Amino acid sequence: MKTVLITGGAGFIGSHLCDFLLGKGFRVICMDNLITGDKKNIMHLKNNKNFSFIKHNVSEHITINEPVDYVLHFASPASPVDYQKIPIQTLKAGSLGTHNTLGLALAKKAKYVLASTSEVYGDPKVNPQPETYWGNVNPIGVRGCYDEAKRFAEALVMAYHRIHKVDTRIARIFNTYGPRMRKDDGRVVPNFMTQALKNKPITVYGNGKQTRSFCYVSDLIEGIYKLMMSDINEPVNIGNPEEHTIIEFAEIIKKLAKSKSKVIFKELPVDDPHVRCPDISKARKELGWEPKTGLEKGLMETISFFKQDSNQ
């Protein structure tokens, strides 16, 4: 049985990875300091003999006293609300956390997967964004703590690959949604759903013409797994190439939630990207992966979760 360490394993994406890899027959060590993760995301796994949880901050030295075959570094605040409240911790997760997890992978001779982000492209001047695009990032802006932490993390991963021959992967994750997102996450899906389900005004920033693409979490996890099992060391975009304007997306959620909410407009935050859409040609060709879940189906699953979560 192969053992995988997942940092950030109690978070939204990390907890789904725990479930998926346990289902594939892995032993899973979940590590999280619970600064943005939540233990309730993994409570259903506590009696699984192949699952263990370690509360630990990846910015501090990591010791695992057993063999590890894969290290998946998914620990980081990932919402603008979070990383603007805790920018230093965000920078540490991307820098010190990446350094510590790479050091562990080197010591254990483990394969390594970095959860990078579409934010490495910043406010892109190229749309959709291919992996060859270098990005347009403001390093000293309010989003820079996350964007630059991930850009540094990618550089460090490639340095460990080239110098120490660590077998590395880099997943550039685009907007993802699904069950286990936090209501106060601050991102588009939980914001709109929470507002729509309460019939409160749906807050659109800017004129609503900026675009995003939304990948359902089960599709994303499948893509990450295929990347993890591949031999691709360069970054790969994992996301849904179906692009929607924010105002269009608000109307879709309003309709699916059967909401009476009105859409209101507020000022666009600083450095908020005007477009965001992945070019997934590389994932299609080299991983045989593309998302399968239609937007409405995925949103209905997520709405059900938010309704249930509200009733608990």
Image (cartoon, grey):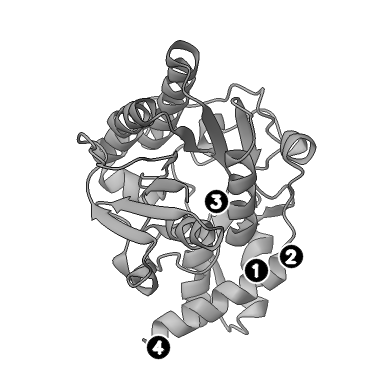
Q: Are marks 2 and 4 in contact (CB under 8 Å)?
A: no
Give residue 9's position: percent from left, percent from top.
38, 54
Q: Secondary structure at mark 3?
A: loop
Who is closer to the viewer here, 309 or 141?
309
CA gap between label 1 and label 4 equals 20 Å
The label shown at residue 311 is 4
Q: Residues within 10 Å of mark 1 (few under 14, many from 20)?
A: some
The label shown at residue 77 is none
Q: Is residue 31 above or below residue 258?
A: above
Q: Are marks 2 and 3 in contact (CB under 8 Å)?
A: no
Q: Residues within 10 Å of mark 3 (few under 14, many from 20)?
A: some
Q: Amino acid at mark 2?
A: Gly
Q: Are marks 2 and 1 in contact (CB under 8 Å)?
A: yes
The residue wearing badge 1 is 298
Q: Quadrant of residue 235?
A: top right
Q: Is residue 75 left or right of residue 190?
A: left
Q: Earlier in the sequence, mark 3 or mark 4?
A: 3
Q: Secondary structure at mark 2?
A: loop
The label shown at residue 294 is 2
Q: Amino acid at mark 1?
A: Gly
Q: Amino acid at mark 4?
A: Asn
Q: Quadrant of residue 141?
A: top left
The label shown at residue 206 is 3
Q: Secondary structure at mark 1?
A: helix
Q: Quadrant of residue 277?
A: top right
Q: Earlier in the sequence, mark 1 or mark 4?
A: 1
**Residue shown at the point (63%, 76%) measured from the top left:** 300
